Image: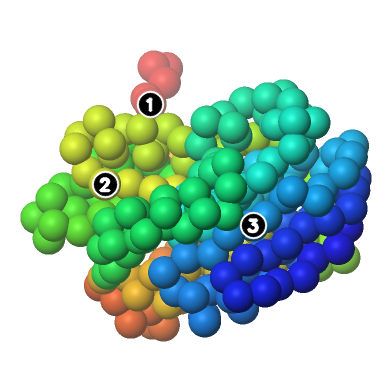
Amino acid sequence: MIVYTRDDVVKLSGSLVRSEWLTIKAACNLLLKEHPEGIIIDCADLGDVAGDGARTFSDAMRDIRSAGSRIVVCNLPDNVLAALRSIPGVKSQLPIATSIEAARSSLKQSSDGHDEALRGCIVVPLAQWTDLGLAVETACRIAKEKRLSLVFVAYLVVARQLALATPLPDEEADATARVDRAVEDARRLNVTALGHVERVRNADEGLLASLREHAAAAAVIAINSALLDDTVTRLANDLMKRAECAITIARGAIAPPTHIQP
């Protein structure tokens, strides 16, 4: 696959046989610095989509949602659209336009609202040790008081000996399910919420990077008391020392010990 850029457009051509989102994302990030109002991914010259190629768009969907949809995909060939239908949720959630002109119009209409939704938001990390109900409840309460939006982020830690884009289907499915549930629950409580899965080498550094990226006003860490261990404690301590935003740490109630009758 070939990726090249012109003005506010990232142009793709060739075949997709594996997820190329990290390569495309790098090009998008460069263009977004010059075109903060939004950019377009033009897929008119894409050929075959085989193997894990369609995962390019599922990976893109999560990052685009987290960025407030400042990226729109356009000119998707019929065979690519057919491949997307095999991935639940992608076609309905990926920002898609029929042409470059339609994509620009869509960005113009939506950029102000999305930028406002993400400015000074509350970042809520979701991990295996997270008490999801407590995280949503606590974050939504603060969001309503401060009139802020929420960004839920699940960090998929990839071992350093593996490529960052290495498929981890089970872990990714679990992380995506947690994010989707949190976003749905928050929206049900009438709080603006976005979410995505972030591939990182280290969860602590990934969280700190998210706080900087979103200029976060606060972070909410909600811990399942049954899963509290040294790793979680270290993360909380590291965050307290290094994060520049406000930090709220919540912990679920500890279950009383069970007494065995003699």
Looking at the rendered image, the quarter that the C terminus falls into is top left
In-front residue for pair 251/76: 76
Q: How is the image coloured?
A: rainbow
Q: Are marks 2 and 3 in contact (CB under 8 Å)?
A: no
In which quadrant of the rendered view does residue 21 lie?
bottom right
Identity of the residue drawn at 87% across and 44% down: 47
Which mark identifies residue 126? none
Mark 1 lies on residue: 258
Mark 2 lies on residue: 192
Pick out the residue farthest to the top. 261
Q: Is residue 154 above or below residue 213?
A: above
Pick out the residue farthest to the left. 145
Image position, residue 6 (x, y; %): 67, 74
Residue 4 can be seen, yes or no: yes
Mark 2–mark 3 distance (CA, rounded to whole Å): 26 Å
Q: Secondary structure at mark 1?
A: loop
- Choose mark 2 or mark 3, whichever is in front: 3
Image position, residue 205 (x, y; %): 56, 73
Looking at the rendered image, the quarter that the N terminus falls into is bottom right
Going by the numbered disc 1, the residue's amino acid type is Thr
| Marks 3 and 1, the one that precedes in the sequence | 3
Pick out the residue farthest to the front. 101
| Marks 2 and 3, the one that precedes in the sequence | 3
Mark 3 lies on residue: 41
Q: Secondary structure at mark 2?
A: loop
Going by the numbered disc 2, the residue's amino acid type is Thr
Identity of the residue drawn at 85% across and 39% down: 49
Going by the numbered disc 3, the residue's amino acid type is Ile
Q: Residues within 10 Å of mark 1 (few under 14, many from 20)?
A: few
